[in-house]
Amino acid sequence: MRFLTEPRLEEIFRQVLNLGSGADVTSLSQSEAPEWDSLAHVSLVLAIENEFGVQVDAADAIELTSFDAVARYLEGYGA
């Protein structure tokens, strides 16, 4: 299922973090991206919830600190 989710998720990351359309976000982590601050993190979680129809628990949101972590989280929900 991840192959369907990943392009949509990549686009969310690019839009929320204001990255170029060709930016590779698949290896992105919060600690490496200066544009991924606390406000961007909240915006990212909200965009993920809206796009994939999931509700991210606050405790889970804290753990979503990389593209891979978000993709695995969504995979767990069958998104």
Image: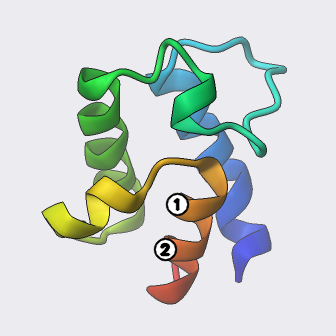
Answer whether labels 1 and 2 touch (C-beta < 8 Å): yes
Location of residue 62 by image quarter:
bottom left
Camera-nearest residue between 63 and 19: 63
- The label on residue 70 is 1
Give how far apart the Cα atoms at labels 1 and 2 are.
5 Å
Looking at the image, which residue is at 45% across and 23% down?
Answer: 36
Amino acid, disc 1: Val
Q: Nearer the viewer, residue 31 or 25?
A: 31
Q: Residue at the location (45% across, 25% down)?
A: 16
Q: Which residue is mark 2?
A: 73
Q: Secondary structure at mark 2?
A: helix
Which quadrant would residue 33 be assigned to in this image?
A: top right
Which residue of the protein is positioned furthest toward the left in this rendering? 58
| Placement of 57 over or under 43, stated as above or below | below
**Can you give x and y, in whole percent of width and height, for residue 10 in the image?**
67, 42
* Relative side of 59 to 50, left or right: left
